[in-house]
Image (tube, rainbow, N blue to C red):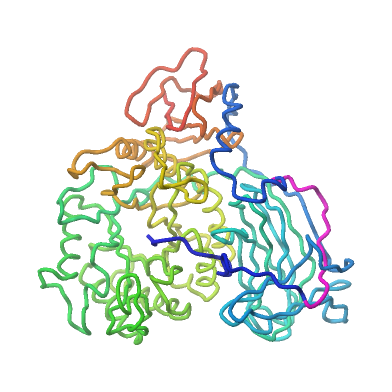
Amino acid sequence: MTACGGGGGGGEGAENTEQSATADLPALVSEAPDTGVSTEELSAETPEAGERATAMAVSSSVLSLPAQGGSSVQSTRLVTSSMNDAYSYTAPGWKLNLWGSPVATADAGRETRAGYVRSGASQRFRMTSKTNGDAHLTYPYAFARGKTYRSTLWVRTDVPTSVTVQMRRDAPPWDAFGTKTVQANSTWQKVEITGTYPGTTTGTLRIASGTPGANLWIDDVTIEQLEFNDLAPFSTAPIPDTLFGMHVNKLGRHQNYPQVGHHVVRLWNTGTTWRDLEPSRGVWSWASGSGGGKRLDMYVDFVKRNDPNAAILYTLGQTPAWASSTPSEKGLYGYGAAGAPANMNDWRNYVREVARRYAGKIKYFELWNEPDYQPHYNGTMQQMVEMARIAHEEVKAVDPTNVLVSPGVTSGQGMGFLNNFLAAGGGAHVDNIGYHWYFSTSPEKLAPMIGNVRQMMNNYGVGNKPLWNTEGAPGCDALTTTCATFVPTQQQVRSSTARALMIMWAKGVSNFNYHIWESGDALARMVEDDFRTPTEASTSYSTMVSWMRGARLLDAYALNGQVYVFKLQRGTEYQYVLWSTVEGQQVQLPDAWTVSTAATLQNTSSALPASRRITLGLEPVMLRR
């Protein structure tokens, strides 16, 4: 977990400075009214409290639930441009966005020469200097929170170069919600990106060139809004054991194993990184009573002794100073820790040593922890991809069934890092894609974020690889809440993770490692100070695991963005998990559902009323025969 959030999608953050263009730029033509937020709402992120107030106004009504959700996709074209328009540098037209110190430079202008246009006219864009910032050609648009957009455009260049197209929130954490990098040349090629908007401020469609001085031409731009069932299950396969994972970080202060139903343990912040295992070249700390090697032995034995069938996910990385390419730079875990290895043979020897020592015990290996956060990694993308190639070779040489997970990146700037990793060929060297999603008391917000990563995976041909949330937990959302004074309700404590588990599986996440079992946070706390007594959050987690494990998710949908419905099949029985984001919402159950009992996360149950009308709140209930 990182100490703080960071800027994404260009990295300019609060220092973002917009410069005047050197040439007139065309405006897109609106084809349909935007159904997004109002101008007043665009001034700042809207607090969750406002959403709850709106929902409370309708909670007294009875919602009749449909028997099933839908899955078809409909699109509405919102804006388009053939780049033949009258040119004026006025909002809401195209703009040059420049930043850095000194500020990056660029120019743009209309192009009409034959051979340089796709139809009629095109837009020329050239980044002339990048410095430590960048130059983007941008188009502001009032993207609406929770809505899904598809942007398409055609590009060509006069010299081969990488071109990145992204849709991005223009407010902290400056995160892209759809992005793709292509290798452009003198042949026109189509670029398409899709994503669901997470913010309430104005966003932008952005185009960036990877080579100073290269001329880039853009033509036939469109932005469409897509309507579909965002919760339609990604998979109807049985829900696997790998979904339910845990971190145990205080071994030594206790020897107690969590009894929550998990079957994966991720080792991170356990004193077992590369720098802990090999303090000097070829000298390993396996026999040292206080060394990281001895501690890793202890952790592996602890897991396998308590649950022989449990899987272990070991996170590689954190370079010893002697092996680091930046030994004088202090990373979060010490000098040199964030650097890539100066000699890749040292990395190879480290991965081989760990994979061989724990053959048959450690099956899953994560390439690096949160490398999108500079205190964790300050190397290049090329070095990260090379480390992936080597690690994949070594873990597979020990056991072909071993699995390498890509670097686990964060939900702020992680989209940009993962895009660059996949664009550089990293996807060919990993078996699973890793991400870190923490979530608030509104875990339903995970759905569009996961969907955006899934879309990026599809962009690079790795959409069939498993997607893992290798680290996450409930917590306060600093963008919408004053966390210093935040006190969660018991309903939030009991429900947040349970709801997140169901959302994650519906969106195709097949691993979630809760961080951490011994947490002292009021919302995430799973065990009391004696490291024995489970909290209500722990009981709720265990119950949801028992509801989900081995079942098949056949259908899911949200009604009015408020009531969430999930249809499970276990054997020949159909079961339904429901909740409402507003307490006290009454719903009428469909006659087609053959259910008679409602069970709660706290392991109580009661018969359904003859009216088949029930009241929902934040805490999921399961309806069954």
Q: Is residue 368 magenta?
A: no
Quarter of the rendering occupied by the C terminus: top left
Q: In this view, does 152 lie to the left or right of 257?
A: right
Q: What range of the chain is rendered magenta?
A: 22-37
Query: Between residues 152 and 373, which one lies in front from this camera angle?
Result: 373
Give residue 231's position: percent from left, percent from top: 55, 43
Query: Between residues 369 and 604, which one lies in front from this camera angle?
Result: 369
Q: Does the magenta stretch include residue 35?
A: yes
Is the magenta region chiefly helix, strand or loop? loop
- Residue 342 lies in quadrant: bottom left
Give residue 230's position: percent from left, percent from top: 59, 45
Residue at coordinates 51% horizontally, 32% vertically from top-left? Answer: 580
Q: Residue furthest front?
A: 485
Quarter of the rendering occupied by the N terminus: bottom left
Give residue 619's position: percent from left, percent from top: 42, 32
Query: Between residues 614 and 338, which one lies in front from this camera angle?
Result: 338
Q: In this view, does 31 lie to the left or right of 180?
A: right
Residue at coordinates 38% horizontally, 52% vertically from top-left? Answer: 512
Give residue 264's position: percent from left, percent from top: 30, 53
- Residue 436 lies in quadrant: bottom left
Q: In this view, does 282 lie to the left or right of 89?
A: left
- Residue 437 lies in quadrant: bottom left
Q: How many labels does the image show?
A: 0
Tell me: residue 160, above or below residue 134.
below
Query: Between residues 47 and 565, which one lies in front from this camera angle?
Result: 47
